[in-house]
Image (spheres, rainbow, N blue to C red):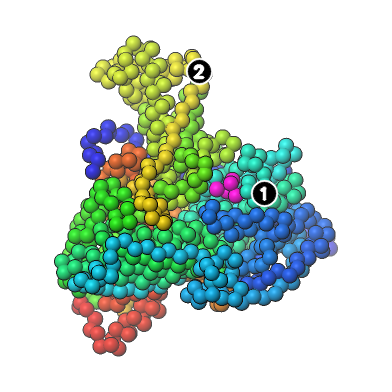
Amino acid sequence: MAATEERPPTRLLGTRIPYIDGPLKVAGRAEYTDDIKRPGMLVGRILRSPWAHARLRSIDVSEAARRPGVFAVLTGDEYPTPFGVLPITHDETALAVGKVRYVGDMIAAVAASDELTAERALAAIRIEVEPLPEHLDPAAGTRPVSEPIHARGLAGTNIQKEVAQHFGDVDAAFARAAHRVHVHGNFAGVTHAFTEPLVTLAEATPDGRLTVWSATQVPHYLHRALSEVLGLPMHRIRVIKPEVGGGFGGKSDPLPHEIVCAALALKTGRAVKILCDREDVFLTNHGRHPTQNDIRIALDADGGILAYDIEAMIDGGAWSSFGTVTTYYNGVLSMGPYRVPNFRYRGRRVYTNKPPSGAMRAHGGTNLRYSIEVALDELADELGMSPFELRERNALPPNSTTVNEFRITSTSFVKCLRAARERSDFDRKFRRLPYGRGVGLGCGFYISGSNSPIHFTPKMPQCTVHLKVDMDGGIAVHCMQADIGQGSNTLLAAIVAEVVGVDLDRVHIVRVDSDVSPIDLGSYSSRVTFMMGNAARLAAESLRDQLLRAAHQLTGYPVAQLRVGHERIEVAHRPEVHVSFQEALHAAMEKTGALLATGSYTSPPMGGSHKGARAGTAPAYSFAAYVAEVEVDVETGEYAAKKIWAAFDCGRPLNRLAVEGQVEGSIHMGLGQFMGEGMNYRGPRLLNPSLLEYKIPMPQQMPEVEVLLVGDDDPEGPFGAKEAGEGPLIATLPALGNALYDAVGVRFLDLPVTPEKVLRGIERARADGRRPRGG
Amino acid sequence: MPPRPNLRLEINGHPVEVPCPDERILLDLIREDLDLTGSKRGCDLGTCGCCTVLLDGRPTLSCLTLARLAEGRSVTTIEGLTPHGGLHPVQRAFVEHGATQCGFCTPGFVLTAVALLRDEPHPDRERVVRAISGNLCRCTGYTKIIEAVLAASGGA
């Protein structure tokens, strides 16, 4: 791979850089959307459907509208234009039009002087409906049904998207295989559970403009959706992203409450805030899809992978959201970290009358990966081979092409495997720890930024960064990238400071504001470090070059002999000859005033030409190998993750503190999905729409985590970096599942793996007369 | 019925007198009436700890506390931790150790940690974990929060 030694050493990047917004956050002074008040601001509230599937016969808002303190009542027919995050599946509306599709679907909204008035007005709305058949089982929805949830479902069914792909000859590969395995996985839906609830503030002003502050991961998609649905040109809408209290994918779709809030602002001519409560947040969902998958793997006699045959049945809920991408990802993200010469996939995502699922951290790669890694563990046992050896033997080589034409450039997967194996002392523990204790290996693979931007008209870069420096010597950075807590503001500032050679405190990240921020496509698909990083580097190099030219004027040395030092520009072979940053800046400003620089990133063309070929293509991929050690109380089924050795290839880690934070946080989220999180339903009703009933792991449940960052530089990533935001989640689940097997000799393929399931598994194994292994 | 007298309490070291209906929740009083927005509303159910304030020095969930219960008592919000600006040692440790990510839970964790270290200046890791177990964080996996609290204690 790209040799590290060819790159100049970095001063700031690669160290532990405390988040630049940390001081504001620890002081409670970071400003989130709900912290903002506007004069005359009204409270917006939303009426949600108690019906899972029903035709709306009539909505009578007359009494609600007459109530004192009510400024506006809104129903779906006022803004019926459909929208959705993917241009090809616009099937949502701001409020229900014609029918409701799940318990929690939004029917009407009010803007009132205060919360109580708003709630009472909602209670005064009269609705008549005709109940329709409830569709709750995705498998049943693959056949023609009476009253499909959407008219756009495939041929009278509730299928939202069907993907069928075949590369190579899977049947022939299975026929000649020496070893075959089939694993069936079942995964409950899980949700993001960010701590900041969904919230939007919108204000219409007499100049004909609309300003929207929102807790969003993708200000640009919100901007587009607002424009389309409200019928206002984008330049009359200003989208501002304050601090965002976590997203994990749940704030990446343009969401209906955001559009409703803006519509209420337009209708009242005032400012309106909609603060969702926790139940609203759970019902909005867009979390990880409830999924069933079937993974069949064929190996040759030496353990070489011959073929994957994969099926997925994905419960979409009421809307499309990212579902078309989800459906592809649940197959094609199996194309790493191993070489798979033959591959067949059939995936179906089916609408159901439940809260919509969408994108959640490690979208489309998590459930698929769990089943594959368990299957490989089974095969390693059958072969009598170390699970590490099986994986190393099949590792995708760098600079290769997968059978479905993904371009693989850098991979340090083998280094990940070796680091995790050695640091965890795996060989000494595996199948050798006493009954009830075990270790397991799980691996991961994820995109480092979707190569295929969701909006593709007009053609434009995926990220643009603008820099402005005035005589104060501060560098103002404008970019629509969305820091939602992952530290992208810090990385953006650090890259600029690194290239220009200045201290970090000279760099100011200007809050995302569509009036001034050039477009970046936001925080999803783990794209920010790679794409924003490259754009920032180019912008900073352009600024640096302006300063070098000014230094040439001052020193007389040719530009080629100049370089940036710390807060100065110096002659490369005579560093004692130098001008300060400020001197160079002021000289450069003599002609132009404030200096401006811009940089942008567009990913290179890649991918095949088959249908869906772009899904899963990325300019780089991350790789992971995790070992988990668990301890099970075999009398109660309770278990604990003791330690996870997390070897991760994010290329060169640019901010070690942030990368560690991403790995640790990812493990927390993966642990939650594995051990206990799940959206539980009785019929169509979500039973646990609160953080009391939907439990995310507490501090006591977190294992010790040893983060091993072993990646080599990526040839195209900024300073050699790749993503670290989502990939680190994936390997957590199979490492835990395989460790439980090592501990008690039972396979768990129905997630979450609650203590009850563990106990039942142990009891079943005993009843079957299987002797617990180890001793 | 005669109007209820104003609520008197001490907020961040200053006496405050405000009109306050009986059903007013302390978090609403703090955020809406007093504009101290550092205390966050995360769940309204007392599960996440984002609304934690110190009531007479004890970590308290302000979303579950009636404002009237603070009558004559002292409330410290995150804004009152360093009344003269700058950062408290616990806050500095959170910054240095990367214990903030999205930051929404941070004020609650900081106040909880401050109360712990005031009572037990040198807790071990297990004690720190127990002390913060009423606060949820979805970003950090708690790892760096625990490191920061231990560092602020000058211990382990």
Q: Chain of mark 2?
A: A
Q: Which residues are magenta?
A: A221-226
Numbered circle sitting on residue A180: none
Provide the residue designation for mark 2. A592
Within-10-Å neighbours for mark 2: few <14, some 14–19, many 20+: few
Residue that appears at 27% across and 61% down: A340
Q: Is residue A679 left or right of residue A33?
A: left
Above or below for A609 versus A701? above
Provide the residue designation for mark 1. A230
Q: What is the three-letter code of the residue carrying label 1?
A: Leu
Q: CA distance from mark 1 to mark 2?
A: 40 Å
x and y percent of residue A658 in the render? 38, 47
x and y percent of residue A443 in the render? 29, 60
Residue that appears at 30% across and 77% down: A746
Q: Nearer the viewer, residue A135 or A72?
A: A135
Q: Nearer the viewer, residue B64 or A523?
A: A523
Pick whichever of labels 1 and 2 is earlier in the sequence: 1
Predominant SS of the magenta segment: helix
Name the element at disc 1. helix
Q: What is the three-letter code of the residue carrying label 2?
A: Thr
x and y percent of residue B153 in the render? 39, 50
Q: Chain of mark 1?
A: A
Label 1 or label 2, whichever lies nearer to me, is 1
